[in-house]
Amino acid sequence: MATYEDCVTEIQKLLSEKVAQGEQVGEDVDLIEEVGLASLDVMELIEQLEDVFDISFPINELGDVRTIGDLARRVQQLT
Amino acid sequence: MSLLDKLEAARSFQDQLGELGVNAIGATIDVVGSATEGRIDGRRVVLAGTNNYLGLTFDPACVEAAVQATQNHGTGTTGSRLANGTYSSHAALERELAEFLGARSTIVFTTGYVANVGTISTLAGPGDVIVLDADSHASIYEGAKLSGAEIYRFRHNDPADLEKRLKRLGDRCARTLVIVESLYSMLGDIAPLKEFCEVKDRYGAHLLLDDAHSFGVMGRNGRGLAEELGVEDQIDFVTGTFSKSLGSVGGWFASRKHDIGPLRSQIRAYMFTASSTPSVIASTRTALQLVSKRCDLRVRLWRNSARVHSALKSLGFNLGADASPVIASIMDSPEQAAAAWQMLLDAGVYVNLVVPPGAPKNLSLLRCSLSAAHTPEQIDHIIDAYALVAERLMGERRAAVAGAV
């Protein structure tokens, strides 16, 4: 089972491929409003996390995910 | 934040499109003269973006059937199917469609969108699982969301990715509805349906196929991709539309494997909306007969599609898929796509302009859809118009390269 920190690190790494300074994005920063990801980018990020951690992430839970911390917590639960 | 901020956001999105020279709510077709000709902004154009695959919108028998039905049964039913909105013609269409498809039963809806939203949200519910192709139509996403089921996406047209997800679900596969389309409307690519069937059977899941774009277009008898691949008996549920190859409007839900009749009293999108008008049902029934009898229309459609696909490829366009009646050219940017779309319109050819977020992967597309009714001269005209666009784009690229040097 992955740790919360593992999940945060992986999300930041994947984000760095999508946005400049992605690795610097803090855990409490809003992925859409502050990082500026479009909903399709978020879906793609989730697809990548599913592969890395061998999980399936229900997309109807996306509404509850606003920050990297939210996403990391849910990914950790699914691992 | 106010509720009305959404209006501002929508206005700003429209303004952005306006800056590209694009009317956000679509081009207005002033006059439609035939299945393939119209007038837009005062220009005579060849219509090459209407999904009118078999060109039946002006078929004399279909038009006559609609006129007769209006005269005999009025302009509308003014009621839902469960109240006063089921006429004998609605029931006849359902029987004829079931016979055509070899289905145990069918249910007819007012639109294809409603058919997907209604059936998906009823077939699956809380505690169930929906696993859908990432490039699914908006109506599939909406139906899935409304169902209350857990929803997972798999990578577009990727049976191995579907298998990974079903494997993770384990015993829950028995409560899982997998949803794919046959021919995808934006890029014109075709699903590996046989492989999808094998995967879902291996894990004991159920499959719903949205056959909006291959019904009437593929298969020896026009029963779609599943007929062409010989997998009709493996598919649990099929939805489709009358608004493409059948040239009218409406949706349907069918199954060869299961008796879906009892769902009639469960599907809210069936129970609480007005039924199709008598004219629509009448022209649809006539068109359905033509789909089974007129194989020549499919031959012409595919011949036209192959000609345009091959010509556009030779012109250097980056095409979304192999030849099919939907031919999408992937453009470099929304601005370039909008300029090219306008050039085509000025040259007398109407295609669909698709800019983000309308297409998968945020692509900008010139989406052309062919018809059996396009004449060889109209196909030449379409190709010539694209050649003008290609010439200009290549000129721009040459200029950019020269500038870089």
Image: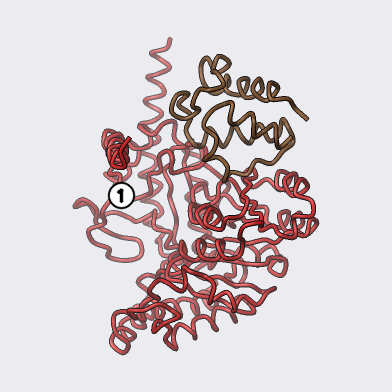
Chain colours: A brown, B red
Image coords of residue B376 (percent x, y): 41, 58
Residue A63 in the figure: left or right of residue B227: left
Relative to residue B132, is residue B346 drawn left or right? left
Looking at the picture, tell me which residue is in the foreground, A22 or B356.
Answer: A22
* Of residues B9 and B100, the one drawn nearer to the viewer in this rendering: B9
Question: Circle 1 sits on which residue?
Answer: B26
The residue positioned 28% from the left and 42% from the top of the image is B4
Residue B360 in view (yes/no): yes
Percent position (x, y) of residue B234?
Answer: 72, 66
Q: Is residue A7 left or right of residue A38?
A: right
**Which residue is at 29% across, 45% downward?**
B347
In this rendering, the answer to whether B185 lies above or below B247 is above
The quadrant in which the N terminus of chain B is found is top left
Asked if B293 appears above or below B301 in the picture, the reply is below
Residue B50 position, x and y percent, is 39, 58
Please state the chain letter of the residue tagged with numbered disc 1 in the rendered image: B
Residue count near mark 1 (Cα–Cα under 10 Å), binned few <14, some 14–19, many ≥20: few
Query: Residue placed farthest to the left in the image?
Result: B42
